[in-house]
Amino acid sequence: MILAFETATNICSVSFQDDGGEIHEKRTERKGSHSELLFLYVRELMKEHDFSIADLDAALVSTGPGSYTGLRIAASAVKGMLFGLNVDVYAGNTLAGFAQSAGEGTVHAVINARRKHLYHQKFEVGESLQLLPGQKFLSLLKLSRC
């Protein structure tokens, strides 16, 4: 089971992948809601799918680029939730995640950096890196065990 956090943009998203590989998500596009809703979404997913944080095999957290505040909120949440548990933590590039979902070929992933700027990265997407059983994600970096 995997719990994933994406908070690099105005979207606050918490996703849960169960043992069967099905993905469940809670999200909002409300600006400035990350600290308010992140833990509520985790609690709702835990209740709806009957799991505890200790049951997780891994947690994924975005490393950006994106909102520094949003990224800090998710990283701090993961660190606090997993403290003292034997759960692997992985960090992934936000733009690589967007590119991977687009399919194969040349992909230009872009998000708004505000003030008339963009975050941009070009990807040649093919076979994704396989790091976790049944899980594909580009540019994952194993951080540590909490």
Image: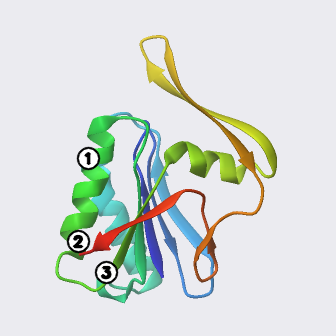
Q: Which residue is mark 2?
A: 81
Find residue 11 and report its horizontal and vertical position in percent. Answer: 46, 42
Looking at the image, is mark 1 or mark 3 earlier in the sequence?
A: 3
Give the amino acid type for the residue marked by disc 3 in the picture: Ile
- Residue at (49, 16) in percent of width and height: 117
The answer to whether marks 2 and 3 mark residues whose Cβ atoms lie closer than 8 Å is: yes
Crowding at mark 2 (Cα within 10 Å: few <14, some 14-19, many 20+)? few
Find residue 3 and report its horizontal and vertical position in percent. Answer: 43, 71
- Residue at (62, 87) in percent of width and height: 20
- Residue at (36, 77) in percent of width and height: 88
Cα separation, mark 2 vs mark 1, equals: 14 Å
Give the amino acid type for the residue marked by disc 1 in the picture: Arg
- Residue at (64, 80) in percent of width and height: 134
- Return the residue nearer the eye: 25 or 78: 78
Looking at the image, is mark 2 or mark 1 earlier in the sequence?
A: 1
72 left or right, relative to 6: left
Q: Secondary structure at mark 1?
A: helix
Q: Secondary structure at mark 3?
A: helix
Q: Establish if 4 lies above or below 62.
A: below
Residue 118 visible from this viewpoint: yes
Q: Which residue is mark 1?
A: 72
Cα separation, mark 1 vs mark 3, equals: 20 Å
63 left or right, relative to 128: left
- Return the residue nearer the eye: 24 or 119: 119
Which quadrant: the C terminus?
A: bottom left
Q: Which residue is mark 3?
A: 53
Location of residue 110 (image quadrant): top right
Cα separation, mark 2 vs mark 3, equals: 7 Å
28 left or right, relative to 67: right
127 left or right, relative to 70: right
